[in-house]
Image (spheres, rainbow, N blue to C red):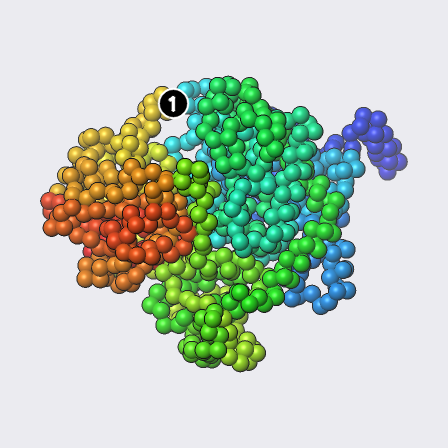
C-alpha cells in the first residue's frame, strides 16, 4: 500500500512538473537564492567564500550533474574548489574522461591510429571556467553559482548537448582569500562614503593584482593548485578566465587579441582563440548588447597570465574583461566620461564605431547585473562551441602535442643545466617549477658530449655527470622554449616614435632571472645511447640527491635562511596595497626570514626595535600622502608625511640601515639630500622605454655587498631607474648597468641612457647607511639571481 502511494505521488509530481514546465531536477536542486537568501549578482549583495562553498556543497549533494572537489588550500588555508559539471553518466565516469584527456595531451602514450580514434570518439571536451582571480573583480564569483544552477537544472536540448559532450571544470574563484576580504570590506562599508572602494590591503595575501602574474613561476599556493589540476591531471582543451577592467572604456573586451603574438604560439591556437571570441561577440550582439570590443588592449605576447599560459600547453586560453561597477554597487557612466577616456591599443574611443567595436555604448546605468549578463552569455558560448565541435577540439589538441614532438632544425635539441654551480637550492627550485607544470627533466648519470652552437653542430664539448637535461621535443615544447629562450620583443612605435606599451612585460627568460647557468644543445654525440642513459626526475628529492641536498620533505618547501645571525628587519607597509611589499614578504617567508611590518603609525611616531627598514617600490606621493579622506575611513587615511620622513632620517642617523627599491628611491634621494639623480626622470617614450625586461648588471666585486655574488647578473627592469652619482666620496656604486649590450631579454628603447649608470648604490648617513636599488631585486618573487644582493644589503 505504501509503495503504491509513493508511485501515485511520484506520478503526480512528474505530471505537475511537466505541466508547469519545471523538471524534477529543478524541484530538488536548491537555487542560490534559496540558500543565500538573495540571488547572486543582485545589487548591493555579496556572498563570501563560506557561502559560495556551502552552496556548491549543497549542489553536489542534490544534483547528479555536479561533483565538487577540493583542489587544495589557499595561501591562508581556505579550501579551493572545482565543480565538475556534466551529465550524470559523465560525472559517474570522471576518471575515465580524465585519462582520455591526459592521453590526448601526451601523444606518446597512444599506441596508434585505432586507439586515437577511440579516444576522440569517447572523449569529452574539457572546459574550465575560472572566476575572480582578482577579488575586486567580484561579480564572476557570484555569477558562478547562477551558471552552476542553470546547468544543473535546465532541460532544454542545447543544455543537454552541452552536458553530454563536455565536462565543465568551474572554479568559483582562484583567490578565495581575496573573495572573503572584499566581501567583508564591502559589507562593512555598505551605506558609507567608502561603499564600493577597494579594501586598503592586498586582496591576495602576497601578490594582490599580481596573482595573475605567477603562472610560470608557481610562487603562490593557488597557482600551484590549479596548475596541478590542469597540467598534471585534467589537461583542459579550453580555459576561460573571467575578469573585469576599468569603468570608463568599452563594456566588454574579448578575443581576438591585439598584436604582437608570441612567435612560440602555434597559429592554430591563435585562430581558435579568435573563433571563440568572435562567436561570443556575435551572441552578445544578437542579444542587443552594446560596447563589445575585440582586437584591442590585450595581446598574446606574455607568458605568465592565467589565460596565456594554456597556449604553451596546447590549450585555448580565453580572456574576457567586463567594465566594472563599484564592486556590487551600480554606477552611472556619462557620455562625457566615455568621451574623455584615453585611447587604448585598438580602441581610439569607447564612443567610436569600428570593425572591432561596431556598436558603442553611450553611457547609462552599469552594475553587477549587467556584468553578469555578459559573463553568462560568454560562458554559454564557450560551452556550446565545445559541445558542437567536440571531436575537432580533441583532435586539434592531440595534433598540437604531436607537432611538438617533431624535431626542427632551427630549434635546439635540449637545454642543459650544468653541474657544479654554486646555488644548488635555486637550481632545485627551478627544476621543481618545471616539473610541477608537467615539463620532463632528466638527470645525467654518465658524462656526455654536446654541440652548444647552432652553426657548429660537429664541435662537441664534454658535459659533466650530475647535469640536468630538458629535451625540447616534448608535448610542451613551446612552454620549454618560451621559458629558456631570450625574448626579442618587436620594436613597436607609433607615428610619433613613441613606444607602444605591451599588455605586460616584454621578457622573462626564467633561468636568467634565477641566476642559473644553462646552455642550448644543438647536437648530441651518440644520441640514442645518451637518451637511453638519462633518468627522468620523478620528484624533486631525486634532483636534490644529485646535488647532495637534504630531502625537501614536501613540495615547494622553504629555502634555507641566508643569514648567519638574524637582523631585526622592518618592512614598511602602508594602506595603499603595495604589491612590491607583498612580493618582498613572500621572498622573506619562503626563506624563513623573520621580519615585521612597520605600519603608518610607527613611521609617524618613531621607528624602533629594528636594525633594517625596507621601503618597497612606491612613488613619493603615494608614500607621503597615502589614501584620501574623501572615500576612506580615518584609520586608513594619509601617508607618512613630513614627520615620517624626519623619523626615517633619525632612524638612519642613529645607526639604522635604510633600503629602498626603485620608485621609493626618489623620495629618499630628496629627503636625505643625496648626490644622486635618476637620469631617466622626465624622459619621453620616444627617448627611453623599458616595460619589463632582463638587463645585465656588472657588479663591483670589491664591495662588501657583492660577497658571494656573480660579477655579471641579470636584473629585472620594469619602468625602473638609473642613477648618476655626482659625489662618489659620499655614494659608492655596488653594481652598474652594463656599459654596452645591457638588454638581455625583452625590449628596451634608448639603451644608451642607462649604459654604465649605477644600479645599486650605498651611502653613509650619520651612524647608519642607505642602500638604494634602482630596480626591484625581488620582482614578483622571480629574480633569484638578485636576491643575494638584497640579502647582503640587509645583513652586511
> Image quadrant for the C terminus?
bottom left
Secondary structure category for the residue under label 1: loop
Q: Decide which of 406, 765 is in the foreground and name it.
A: 406
Residue 742 picture location, percent across and down:
33, 55
Camera-nearest residue between 39 and 641: 641
- Up the image or down, 121 lies above or below 675; here it is below
Q: Nearer the viewer, residue 392 or 343?
A: 343
Q: Is residue 445 visible?
A: no
Residue shown at 42%/64% (left/top)?
A: 428
Residue at image coords 33%, 68%: 422
Location of residue 170 (image quadrant) = top right
Residue bearing the label numbered 1: 631
Q: Is residue 330 above or below residue 521?
A: above
Where's residue 550, x and y in %?
Answer: 39, 68
Q: Position of residue 643 (x, y in %)?
A: 19, 31
Q: Position of residue 136 (x, y in %)?
A: 48, 33
Please determine whether, in this image, residue 335 is positioned above or below residue 222: above
Question: What residue is drawn where x is 24% and y is 51%?
Answer: 758
> Horizontally, is 729 left or right of 421 in the view?
left
Q: Nearer the viewer, residue 253 or 54?
A: 253
Q: Residue at x 17, y 52 (%)?
A: 732
Circle 1 crowding by C-alpha within 10 Å: few under 14, some 14–19, many from 20: some
Q: How many marks?
A: 1
In this view of the protein, can residue 720 be seen by the observer?
yes
Residue 549 placement, left or right of 327: left
Residue 209 falls in which quadrant of the image? top left
Q: Quadrant of residue 487?
A: bottom left
Q: For the N terminus, give its image quadrant.
A: top right
Amino acid at each position: 500500500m505504501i509503495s503504491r502511494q509513493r508511485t501515485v505521488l511520484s506520478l503526480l509530481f512528474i505530471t505537475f512538473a511537466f505541466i508547469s514546465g519545471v523538471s524534477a531536477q529543478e524541484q530538488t536542486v536548491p537555487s542560490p537564492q534559496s540558500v543565500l537568501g538573495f540571488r547572486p549578482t543582485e545589487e548591493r549583495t555579496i556572498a563570501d567564500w563560506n557561502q559560495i562553498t556551502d552552496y556548491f556543497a549543497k549542489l553536489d549533494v542534490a544534483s547528479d550533474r555536479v561533483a565538487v572537489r577540493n583542489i587544495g588550500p589557499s595561501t591562508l588555508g581556505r579550501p579551493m574548489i572545482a565543480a565538475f559539471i556534466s551529465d550524470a553518466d559523465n560525472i559517474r565516469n570522471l576518471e575515465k574522461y580524465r585519462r582520455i584527456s591526459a592521453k590526448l595531451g601526451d601523444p606518446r602514450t597512444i599506441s596508434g591510429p585505432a586507439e586515437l580514434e577511440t579516444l576522440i570518439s569517447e572523449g569529452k571536451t574539457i572546459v574550465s571556467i575560472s572566476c575572480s582571480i582578482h577579488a575586486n573583480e567580484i561579480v564572476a564569483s557570484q555569477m558562478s553559482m547562477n551558471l552552476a544552477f542553470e546547468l544543473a537544472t535546465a532541460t532544454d536540448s542545447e543544455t543537454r548537448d552541452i552536458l553530454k559532450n563536455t565536462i565543465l571544470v568551474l572554479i568559483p574563484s582562484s583567490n578565495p582569500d581575496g573573495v572573503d576580504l572584499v566581501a567583508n570590506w564591502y559589507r562593512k562599508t555598505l551605506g558609507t562614503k567608502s561603499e564600493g572602494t577597494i579594501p586598503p590591503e592586498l586582496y591576495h595575501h602576497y601578490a594582490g593584482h599580481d596573482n595573475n602574474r605567477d603562472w610560470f613561476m608557481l610562487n603562490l599556493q593557488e597557482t600551484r593548485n590549479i596548475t596541478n589540476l590542469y597540467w598534471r591531471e585534467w589537461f583542459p582543451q579550453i580555459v576561460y578566465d573571467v575578469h573585469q577592467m576599468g569603468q570608463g572604456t568599452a563594456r566588454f573586451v574579448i578575443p581576438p587579441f591585439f598584436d604582437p603574438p608570441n612567435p612560440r604560439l602555434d597559429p592554430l591556437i591563435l585562430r581558435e582563440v579568435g573563433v571563440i571570441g568572435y562567436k561570443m561577440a556575435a551572441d552578445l550582439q544578437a542579444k542587443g548588447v552594446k560596447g563589445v570590443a575585440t582586437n584591442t588592449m590585450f595581446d598574446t605576447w606574455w607568458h605568465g597570465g592565467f589565460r596565456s599560459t594554456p597556449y604553451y600547453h596546447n590549450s585555448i586560453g580565453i580572456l574576457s574583461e567586463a567594465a566594472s561597477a563599484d564592486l556590487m554597487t551600480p554606477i552611472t557612466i556619462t557620455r562625457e566620461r566615455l568621451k574623455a577616456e584615453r585611447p587604448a591599443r585598438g580602441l581610439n574611443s569607447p564612443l567610436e564605431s569600428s570593425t572591432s567595436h561596431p556598436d558603442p555604448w553611450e553611457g547609462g546605468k552599469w552594475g553587477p547585473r549587467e556584468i553578469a549578463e555578459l559573463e553568462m552569455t560568454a560562458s554559454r558560448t564557450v560551452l556550446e562551441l565545445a559541445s558542437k565541435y567536440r571531436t575537432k577540439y580533441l583532435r586539434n589538441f592531440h595534433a598540437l602535442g604531436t607537432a611538438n614532438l617533431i624535431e626542427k632544425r632551427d630549434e635546439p635539441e635540449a637545454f642543459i643545466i650544468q653541474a657544479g654551480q654554486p646555488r644548488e637550492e635555486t637550481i632545485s627550485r627551478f627544476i621543481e617549477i618545471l616539473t610541477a607544470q608537467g615539463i620532463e627533466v632528466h638527470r645525467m648519470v654518465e658524462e656526455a658530449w654536446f654541440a652548444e652552437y647552432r652553426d657548429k653542430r660537429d664541435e662537441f664539448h664534454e658535459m659533466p655527470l650530475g647535469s640536468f637535461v630538458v629535451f625540447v621535443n616534448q608535448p610542451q615544447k613551446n612552454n620549454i622554449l618560451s621559458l629558456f629562450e631570450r625574448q626579442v620583443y618587436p620594436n613597436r612605435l607609433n607615428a610619433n616614435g613613441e613606444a607602444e606599451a605591451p599588455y605586460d612585460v616584454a621578457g622573462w627568460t626564467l633561468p636568467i632571472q634565477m641566476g642559473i647557468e644553462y646552455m642550448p644543445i644543438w647536437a648530441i654525440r651518440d644520441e640514442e645511447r645518451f637518451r637511453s642513459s638519462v633518468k627522468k626526475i620523478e620528484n624533486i628529492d631525486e634532483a636534490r640527491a644529485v646535488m647532495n641536498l637534504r630531502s625537501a620533505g614536501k613540495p615547494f618547501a622553504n629555502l634555507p635562511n641566508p643569514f648567519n645571525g638574524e637582523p631585526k628587519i622592518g618592512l614598511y607597509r602602508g594602506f595603499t596595497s603595495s604589491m612590491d611589499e607583498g612580493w618582498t614578504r613572500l621572498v622573506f617567508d619562503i626563506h624563513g626570514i623573520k621580519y615585521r611590518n612597520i605600519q603608518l603609525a610607527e613611521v609617524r611616531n618613531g621607528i624602533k626595535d629594528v636594525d633594517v627598514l625596507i621601503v618597497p617600490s612606491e612613488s613619493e606621493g603615494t608614500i607621503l600622502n597615502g589614501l584620501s579622506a574623501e572615500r576612506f575611513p580615518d584609520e586608513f587615511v594619509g601617508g607618512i608625511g613630513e614627520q615620517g620622513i624626519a623619523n626615517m632620517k633619525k632612524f638612519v642617523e642613529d645607526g639604522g640601515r635604510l633600503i629602498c627599491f626603485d620608485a621609493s628611491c626618489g623620495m629618499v634621494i630628496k629627503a636625505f639630500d643625496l648626490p644622486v639623480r635618476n637620469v631617466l626622470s622626465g624622459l619621453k617614450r620616444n627617448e627611453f622605454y623599458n616595460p619589463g625586461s632582463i638587463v645585465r648588471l656588472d657588479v663591483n666585486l670589491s664591495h662588501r655587498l657583492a660577497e658571494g655574488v656573480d660579477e655579471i647578473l641579470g636584473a629585472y627592469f620594469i619602468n625602473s631607474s638609473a642613477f648618476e652619482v655626482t659625489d662618489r666620496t659620499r655614494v659608492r656604486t655596488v653594481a652598474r648597468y652594463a656599459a654596452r649590450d645591457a638588454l638581455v631579454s625583452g625590449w628596451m628603447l634608448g639603451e644608451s641612457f642607462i649604459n654604465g649608470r649605477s644600479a645599486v648604490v650605498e651611502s653613509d648617513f650619520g651612524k647608519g647607511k642607505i642602500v638604494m636599488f634602482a630596480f626591484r631585486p625581488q620582482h614578483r618573487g622571480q629574480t633569484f639571481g638578485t636576491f643575494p644582493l638584497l640579502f647582503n644589503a640587509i645583513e652586511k
